Amino acid sequence: MARKRVVLGMSGGVDSSVAAWLLKQQGYEVIGLFMKNWEDEDDSEYCSTREDWIDAASVADVVGVDIEAVNFASEYKDRVFAEFLREYEAGRTPNPDVLCNAEIKFKAFLDHAVSLGADLIATGHYARVRQGGDGRFELLKAVDASKDQSYFLHRLNQAQLSRTLFPLGELHKTQVRHIADSLALPNAKKKDSTGICFIGERPFREFLNRYLSFKPGPMKTADGAVVGEHVGLSFYTLGQRKGIGIGGMKGYRNQQGEAAPWYVARKDVASNTLYVVQGHDHPWLLSGALTASQVSWVSGDAPAQEALAAKTRYRQADVACRHQTRDSAGNFTLEFPVAQWAVTPGQSAVLYDGEVCLGGGIIASAGPFQPV
């Protein structure tokens, strides 16, 4: 019987490298695919594509798998980056990693893998796939809760999940590092990548300035007092504390008599006004409900039950919520019994039933918290 062919996304990082070895150990025929998704600034100090390709090719040689590089920069620019810019222009804070997974890593990548004769695809994400009793595929959280990436994968559908393997889903990161060390992989000590893929470690403001034009405007408090000038609404996100530029101003003081820090609380795109408040628990930073659009459900259907759990940002612990579909487009609302901090339009609201990731949507708006 012929071995199943798996095309694995290899980034040059430790996770996908160990995934390649695990798949070979499981008896699959493995082909590595290195995706180049950004090429505007290949020669800049922030671009690591060349080094990543060298690492991926070196690992492929050690593990004993074939590898090829494929350029998805055009698809990335059209499907991910253009949406990223549109969202920032509208005053929202998008999460490009969610869109990249849905449109590039599990769509363009999957299509290319099929052209290579792949039976399955695999990535180094920390998540799991399980086929339920009804034949549908479920997206599960990773065993390592601190590394779980199901939040970023919530837009995957049945067709994508049915052909996807996550070799690291049952492992802890410490085990992955140990395997890399024991195999003497050339990138065993490589640090995990951080930040948005196409921005890297460069200053965010400097990057956006290359693609968007910005208009300074007033920075006001909740009572309408002007306390400064912002440099452009797109440079700020709700809940932001650093980089606002008014840290030394006098104002609200806590019980110890200390001046409380300022936070970005609202954006008014129509008047080009940025609102800031003092104190982490200011009412403007607390929400008791949200509305989400651009909805995607892993099973293909909205969950029937109302009592679920949700994350409104990555790294957040699951919080209890009440889910209701509100219109024919499938947009939904979530109501929270406990105040949620800095719920941000443009980010994803992802729903869970225990360890099962059900799907979610893009936060369109948030409502104030009203204690019972």
Image (tube, rainbow, N blue to C red):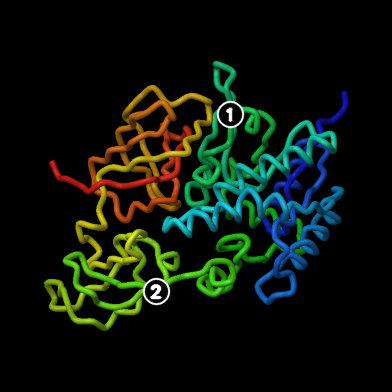
Direction front: furthest residue: 270
Q: Quadrant of the C terminus?
A: top left
Left or right for 90, reference 17: left
Q: Quick one: SS at disc 1? A: strand
Q: Residue at x 68, y 40 (%)?
A: 107
Residue 352, percent across and down? 42, 35
Q: Is residue 292 above or below residue 268?
A: above
Q: Using the image, tell me which numbered label, if any, was put on residue 216.
A: 2
Give residue 127's position: percent from left, percent from top.
57, 41
| Residue nearer the viewer, 99 or 186 | 99
- The residue at which mark 1 appears reads as 130
Nearer to me, 309 or 331: 331
x and y, in percent, of residue 163 in the image: 69, 31
The image quarter containing residue 117 is top right
Q: Residue type at mark 1?
A: Arg
Q: Dot 2, crowdedness within 10 Å: few (<14), some or many (≥20)? A: few
Q: Residue 54 in the image: x percent, y percent?
A: 80, 64
Is 253 drawn above or below residue 150 in the view shown?
below
Q: Is residue 143 visible?
A: yes
